Amino acid sequence: MPEQETAAHRRTPAQEVAGFLRDRQEQIAQRWADAALFRTVFTHSRDEAVEAGRAVVDALAAVATAEAVEDAESGGFHVVRDQLARTAASRARAGSSITDISREVDALRPPVTELFLAEFPDAPAEHVRECTTTLTVLMGTLRLVVLETALSEGEEVIHRQRLQLLEVATPVIKLWEGIVAVPLIGTLDSARSQVVMETLLDSIVEQHARFAILDITGVPTVDSLVAQHLMKTVAAARLMGAECIVSGIRPPIAQTIVHLGIDLSSVLTRASLADALAYALRQQGADIVAREGAGSEYR
Amino acid sequence: MQTAGGVSACLPIHSDLDLVWVRQHVRQAAAQLGFGLVEQTKLVTAASELARNTLIHGGGGQMECAPVAAGGVQGLRLAFSDEGPGIPDLDRALMDGFTSGEGLGMGLGGARRLVHDFKIDSRPGGGTTVTVTTWLSVPPRPREER
Ligand SMILES: Nc1ncnc2c1ncn2[C@@H]1O[C@H](COP(=O)(O)OP(=O)(O)O)[C@@H](O)[C@H]1O
Ligand SMILES: [Mg+2]
């Protein structure tokens, strides 16, 4: 076919591959639907597997058109990145290791190469070799994209679990109308402080709170970083219209803060959570008074 | 009287989690040597500051913890060392409020106030070692370094 031959000479290998992918999208998608990667993920419907395959072929064609076959960041991959991430995540959940997933993506290549070689039986050998190399590189880049999304998905899961743990550890309690409190327990590292601050600010908005009590009875060490986080939280709460009260600073910690040289005078403090609540109530016009005849007296 | 077991240790400082171990170890070592709650808290807080500096400014390193004795008085010595960039201007670094990062700049000066003996070895490009000692009672005189 002289016409095809001249066309083949005009096009770069990447464009040749792009054209082939577009022309043969359906056949490729059909073959991929039977490959392990798609078959095991789309167990309910083969049509979905074919659909997913089509999208990936489309993406590869776009990447090849952009002459970016080596570029895992190529815009062409954007549209399928989520889909690939879900596919990889689904394989990972089923117990596949990264190596397994890598092998499964690799297995997508032979059917495509086969189709490609069948397409150009008469093209110059040199050109066909260049094109298959380009195709191989492109499929290698696809594998890289899948592995990348698989790994970041894994990090994402760990990150989410960590955040969940953090959330569990920092419940915001509504003590009274307009008064919320967080009893802080354990180490206040940066990540956890961030979560505390966010959940507290959220609940200030939700509860229309005017007072937020941060009780640090359960925090073993208050160093300059913890103090900085506390001050930031107090400042942010203030911007939301709520006053923060830090309670539960135990005597050894108070002494240490003073030696450390940290000035908490901008922060309202109370010895105990009960004192902080009493203060907030009084500010709201309510008072805690001991019943007459009761044994103890609230100061 | 006390056995040194559990006091001497060399702990890595390469992550936030390592800082938790450092604090825990210092607290437990100080308690074992018989430090009161206030001294324990001060030393642990100083350790927290210095270990975080090792991690953040020094790019990671380690803490060596050892019991010391001088003039019949016992103490606890902590040495935080890293191979990081070093501190170019010690006076400035020790100044309250000076930070080259995003901290409060109270760590070094604060730690110095929280312990009895405080010493920095640092060369630009040659890493940093901060050694602190807290004594069980009044610092013995003359002070004896190692
Ligand atoms: N181990 C270290 N290696 C290099 N630089 C350090 C080290 N420790 C402290 N510094 C320097 O000294 C400054 C002051 O330290 P510090 O008082 O702890 O304040 P902060 O850590 O909040 O910046 C730091 O900002 C940093 O520039
Ligand atoms: Mg510091």
Image (tube, coloured by chain):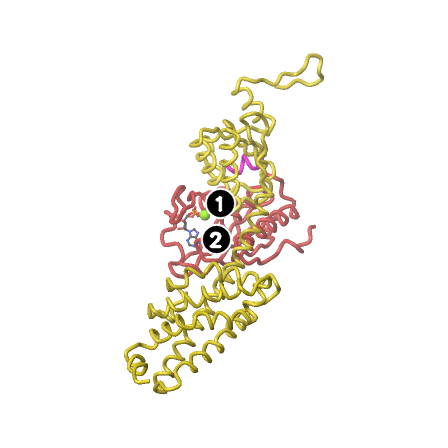
Asked whether the residues under marks 1 and 2 belong to the same chain, the reply is: yes
Quarter holding the N terminus of chain A is bottom left
- x%, y% of residue B34? 65, 44
Q: Indicate the chain on which mark 2 is placed.
A: B
Quarter holding the C terminus of chain A is top right
Which hue belongs to chain B?
Answer: red
Query: In the structure shown, which secondary structural element does the residue marked by tag 2 occupy?
Result: strand
Q: Indicate the chain on which mark 1 is placed.
A: B
Q: Amino acid at mark 1?
A: Ala
Q: Is mark 1 within 8 Å of ligand 1?
A: yes
Pointer 2: residues within 10 angstroms few (<14), some, or many (20+)? many
The residue stretch that appears in magenta: A252-257
Q: CA distance from mark 1 to mark 2?
A: 10 Å
Q: Are dots 1 and 2 in contact, CB under 8 Å?
A: yes
Query: In the structure shown, which secondary structural element does the residue marked by tag 1 occupy?
Result: helix
In the depicted structure, whether residue B61 falls above or below residue A34: above
The residue indicated by pointer 2 is B130
The residue indicated by pointer 1 is B111
Chain letter for yellow?
A: A
Q: Closer to the N terminus: mark 1 or mark 2?
A: 1
